Amino acid sequence: MSATTPSLFDPFTLGGLTLPNRIVMAPLTRNRAVAGFVPSPMAAQYYGQRADAGLLITEASQISQQGQGYQDTPGIYSDAQVEGWKTVTDAVHAKGGRIFIQLWHVGRVSHTSLQPNGGAPVAPSALVAATKTYVNNSFAETSMPRALETSEIAGILEDYRRAAANAIRAGFDGVEVHGANGYLIDQFLKDGANERTDEYGGSIANRTRFLLEVMDAVIGEIGAARTGLRLSPVSPANGITESDPQALFNHVIEELEKRQPVYIHVVEGATGGPRDVAPGFSFEELRKRYSGAWMVNNGYDLDLANTVLGEGKADLIAFGKPFIANPDLVERLRRRAPLNEVDRDTLYGGGEKGYLDYPTLADAAA
C-alpha cells in the first residue's frame, strides 16, 4: 500500500509513543488475580508473549473494591497491586512493547459478595442489570444496586485519579478509561440505566457529565497524551439501553474533542457479537467529530482491518479473542497464517492451561 493508504503493519505515532504497527490487543478479562486482587505472577509472561502488538491494553482493572464485579479480577488501588503490575510492565518493556491499563468501575454489574461489607453495588439509579456476573466459581444474577448520592460522586472521581497515578507508578505507558459495555460510566450515559433528576441525569449534557469529570480527573493527573477511552455506543452488553445513541454520542465525541485524549476506542456493534447497527446510526458521524486517534474493535480480520484503515475510517485496530489463542498474532497476520482456536473452557480463571500454553508458529515449526 502507498504512504497515503496505511496498512495494519505501518507504524503510528500515539502521543509520545511510536507504535511499530497498528495492531492493538484489546482488554480481555481472564480472572486469574491472586490474593489481594494482585495480578498473577503468570501475567508478566502472558503480556510479554504478546509484546509485539503495537499497543497492549490490559484486562479491565478495578479502581476500588466497590468497582469490582467479578471474582479474581485485578485492581490498581493498592500498593501490592501496583507492585504486581510492575512485573508486567517490566516484562513488556523488556521486549520493546508498549502497554496501557484499562481502568474499571463496574457499577451495578456486581454482586454483594464482592462489595465492601457485603453492601449493595452502586449505580446511577436503583435499576438491576439484566445480566449475570461470575462469583464463587459460578454465574449468578447481579445484585440490586443502590443509587449513588450526588455527594458520593466526588469520591469515585478521586478513585479514578488515584488509579491513574498508580498506573504510572506501576510503569504503564498510559491508561484506558473503560466507558463501555454497560459498566458505571455507560450506565450514567445511557437513559435505560439513568433515571436521575440531579445534574447527572435527564438531559444528554447531564448524563455525559460523569464521563467528562472522570476524563478531566485522569487527564489532570497524567495528561491527555497518556489517557485513552473506550466507548460502546450501540452495544447492549450487560443489559444497557439508550433511546437515541446518535444524539448522545455525537455530543460525547464533541466534548471529547475539546479534551483530546490520546485515542478513542470504539466497539462497533454489539460487544463480542454482530457488527450490525440499527438503521439511522452512523459511526462515521462520530469519527468525523474527532481529530485524534480513532481505534475500532469487534470482529476484525486482516482484510477488514486493512480496508477500514485504507478508507481512513480508523487509525488503529483492536483484536480481542484472537490474541488469547495466538500470542504471536502479529506474525500470524503478517504471514496470513492460520490462527489457533480459543479454548472457551479456560477463558476465565484457572492456571497456565489456556493462558500461557498456546503454541506459536515457531513452536509448530520446531
Image (cartoon, rainbow, N blue to C red):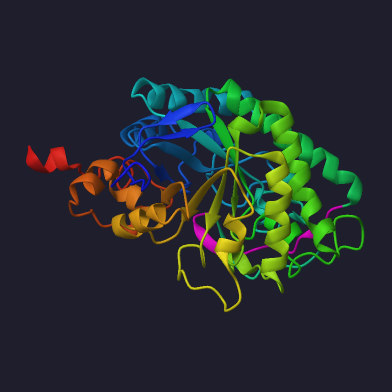
Residue, x 30% and y 40% (percent of image)?
Answer: 356
- Indicate the quadrant containing the C terminus: top left, top right, bottom left or bottom right: top left
Residue 304 shown left or right of residue 361 in the figure: right
Q: Which sits in the foreground, 14 or 129? A: 14
Image coords of residue 71 (percent x, y)? 55, 49
User: Is residue 37 visible in the rendered structure shown here?
Assistant: yes
Q: Which sits in the foreground, 113 or 21? A: 21
User: Is residue 77 visible in the rendered structure shown here?
Assistant: no
Residue, x 71% and y 74% (percent of image)?
Answer: 243
Q: In this view, does 346 lie above or below 216?
A: below
Q: In this view, does 219 lie above or below 357?
A: above
Residue 241 shown left or right of residue 284 in the figure: right
The quarter holding residue 238 reads bottom right
Q: Is residue 147 magenta?
A: yes
Image coords of residue 152 (percent x, y)? 86, 45
Q: Does the magenta stretch include residue 28?
A: no
